[in-house]
Amino acid sequence: MELPGVQLRTLLELTRSRTMTAAAAALGYTPGAVSQHIAALERTTGAELVRRAGRRVELTDAGRVLAVHAERILGAQAEAVAALERARGEVGGRLRLGVFGTAAAVLLPPALRRLAARHPGVRVASREVDVDQAYAEVLAGRVDLALGLDYPDAPLDRDGAVELVRLRSERFALAVPAGRVPRAADRRPVSLAAAHDWILPAAGSYYGRAIRTACRRAGGEPRVVHEVTDTATSLAMVGAGLGVAPLTGLMLRLRSEGIVAVPLRETVERHVVVAVGSAARGRPSVAALIAALRAGAEGEAGAAADGAAGRPGAGGATSGSGAG
């Protein structure tokens, strides 16, 4: 009897999500695909694994038994891969890495150069994923690791099967059009929220929720006029005088023309993280890639802050750019 990993992961997600729709969202599938995975698993095992209970689904006795073993099977597979890598005594193999826009442009190139110089046997294939889906991509097994963002004001969901490894923290500043720098006394989120049009992602995103929460905590509500997700586009709009937008050192590497970074008096942060399967942490190749990404994140963010500090008054950021 063969039990495909993708079907076992679907069953495990159903035990957590309790609905086909929620499981599909977490795994990045359609509800129909989730139903197909479960139906295929039931045909293979010859047992009913889930049953409807109103809008939710419940595992049958057979489903609960298989779910316990599914977690062990998937964990054992990951541990076997890690053990084989260690037994070879070499750091090598192929890894699938999920990246989002800023990470692909700023963090990935220096990290892969560093990895290739130190561990040429490790081959990394990257694919762009929605930054809010980094955790789900690893959980679903579509990538081995994924770069993501975690916000204290809107934290990612946690699950024992996936760990978040922090690469660095960044403090937010505010990107404003050159020539419109607020007075120091007005550099609070509540004052900035009331005085400017904002360019932000949708409220349902982790990023959009985090910034709105920070403003509300200070007693203000950002007046979002332009709802934009792409960072480079947002900063271009700021440079054109269409509003203000949050800014970190890594973001500044994408665009700095026509904007000034205004430090905030309150601390608003985000963490650049890597989502990785808990069992995969023992793979030497995974450890090597995480180390390269961490070094790249620290180096690139530091360069962004230094570069910003060197360009005050020239359309770049002030020395307090909030790069962390």
Image: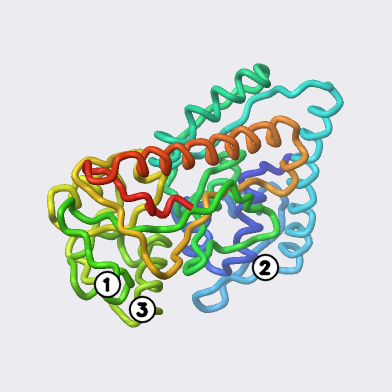
Q: What element carries label 1?
A: helix
Q: Where does the N terminus fall, quadrant-wise?
A: top right
Q: Can residue 312 be seen in this view?
A: yes
Decide: few, some or many residues near mark 1? Use Cα within 10 Å; few <14, some 14-19, many ≥20.
some
Q: Looking at the rendering, which quadrant does residue 291 occupy?
A: top right
**Residue behind mark 2:** 59
Q: Earlier in the sequence, mark 1 or mark 3?
A: 1
Farthest bottom residue?
A: 219
**Residue behind mark 3:** 216
Q: Looking at the rendering, which quadrant does residue 186 occupy?
A: bottom left
Farthest left residue?
A: 241
Relative to 262, does residue 311 appear above or below in the rendering? above
The residue type indicated by label 1 comes to: Asp
Decide: few, some or many residues near mark 2? Use Cα within 10 Å; few <14, some 14-19, many ≥20.
many
Residue 220 lies, in percent from the top left, at 30, 79
Q: What element carries label 3?
A: helix
Farthest right residue?
A: 87
Nearer the observer: mark 1 or 2; the answer is 1
Q: Which of marks 2 and 3 is nearer the N terminus?
A: 2
Decide: few, some or many residues near mark 3? Use Cα within 10 Å; few <14, some 14-19, many ≥20.
some
The residue type indicated by label 3 comes to: Arg
Kindly check if marks 2 and 3 are in contact, taking CB atoms under 8 A apart as contact: no
Relative to 101, does residue 20 appear above or below in the rendering? below
Residue 130 lies, in percent from the top left, at 42, 48
Q: What element carries label 2?
A: strand
Nearer the observer: mark 1 or 3; the answer is 1
Kindly check if marks 1 and 2 are in contact, taking CB atoms under 8 A apart as contact: no
Relative to 235, does residue 310 appear above or below in the rendering? above
Query: Is residue 262 or residue 96 the one in the foreground?
Result: 262
